[in-house]
């Protein structure tokens, strides 16, 4: 593979922005799932699979670009980490939706909407932040807010677990519901990994 001494103009920035924008699509499908009937969910799941596939394609494009460029806009390790963390968010969201369908969960866990609300906000501000990587400005508020959201998500997650383990539900329901909320907690953690990587890049480039 021939190495380019300079990457294609704005290619990395465009792909990071596209990856983050696709997370907004993924979370919107998750939101749609909350208001759906069980018969509507397989179709939503198929659309989520398409969004997850699109994220994979973007991630592979970033990897191909970094592997074929002699010079990159910032450290290769950070590029890999940022691309992977963005993809991890989508993977977790996709897994949550898939589990709801596979497990035939008719009644979604109470409080799931609170988790989704955190992810919705995280997706919006991540999508808004990615284009600012071009100039490395006005990013501090982004990673501070993501950290706050992740902390809020942890509290919601613990409340959901406490209710699941209250004795109100049978063991099978507890297992099914826990796997879904675990995946959404993983999505929130992945959003924080994205923000931590952006902070690391910004510090190195300052």
Image (cartoon, rainbow, N blue to C red):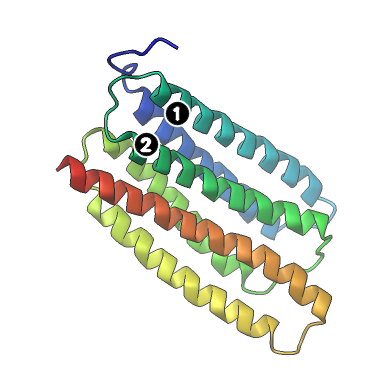
Residue 172, compared with residue 162, is above or below; it is above
Residue 110, compared with residue 77, is above or below; it is below
Q: Nearer the viewer, residue 20 or 60?
A: 60
Any mark on residue 62, and which? 1
Q: Are marks 1 and 2 in contact (CB under 8 Å)?
A: yes
Q: Position of residue 172 (x, y in %)?
A: 82, 74
Residue 106, compared with residue 135, is above or below; it is below
Any mark on residue 79, and which? 2
Asked whether the viewer can see residue 28, the reply is no
Residue 6, compared with residue 147, is above or below; it is above
Q: Residue at x 67, y 52 (%)?
A: 95
Asked whether the viewer can see residue 69, the reply is yes
Instruction: Determine the residue located farthest toward the top in the rendered image.
Output: 2
- How many C-alpha atoms fall within 10 Å of the one at disc 2: few (<14), some, or many (≥20)? many
Quadrant of the image for the C terminus? top left
Instruction: Determine the residue located farthest toward the bottom in the rendered image.
Output: 167
Q: Residue at x 45, y 12 (%)?
A: 1
């Amino acid at each position: 593979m021939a190495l380019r001494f300079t990457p294609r103009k704005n290619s990395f920035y465009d792909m990071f922005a596209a990856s983050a924008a696709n997370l907004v699509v993924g979370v919107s499908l998750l939101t749609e799932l909350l208001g759906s009937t069980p018969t509507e969910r397989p179709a939503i799941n198929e659309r989520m699979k398409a969004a997850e596939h699109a994220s994979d394609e973007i991630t592979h494009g970033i990897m191909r670009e970094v592997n074929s460029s002699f010079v990159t806009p910032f450290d290769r390790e950070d590029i890999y980490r940022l691309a992977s963390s963005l993809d991890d968010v989508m993977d977790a969201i996709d897994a949550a939706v898939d589990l709801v369908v596979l497990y035939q969960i008719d009644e979604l866990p109470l409080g799931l909407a609170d988790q989704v609300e955190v992810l919705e906000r995280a997706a919006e501000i991540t999508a808004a932040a990615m284009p600012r990587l071009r100039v490395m400005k006005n990013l501090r508020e982004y990673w501070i807010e993501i950290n706050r959201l992740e902390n809020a998500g942890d509290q919601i997650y613990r409340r959901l677990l406490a209710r699941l383990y209250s004795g109100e539900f049978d063991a099978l329901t507890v297992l099914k519901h826990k796997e879904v909320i675990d995946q959404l907690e993983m999505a929130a953690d992945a959003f924080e990994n994205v923000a931590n990587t952006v902070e690391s890049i910004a510090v190195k480039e300052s």
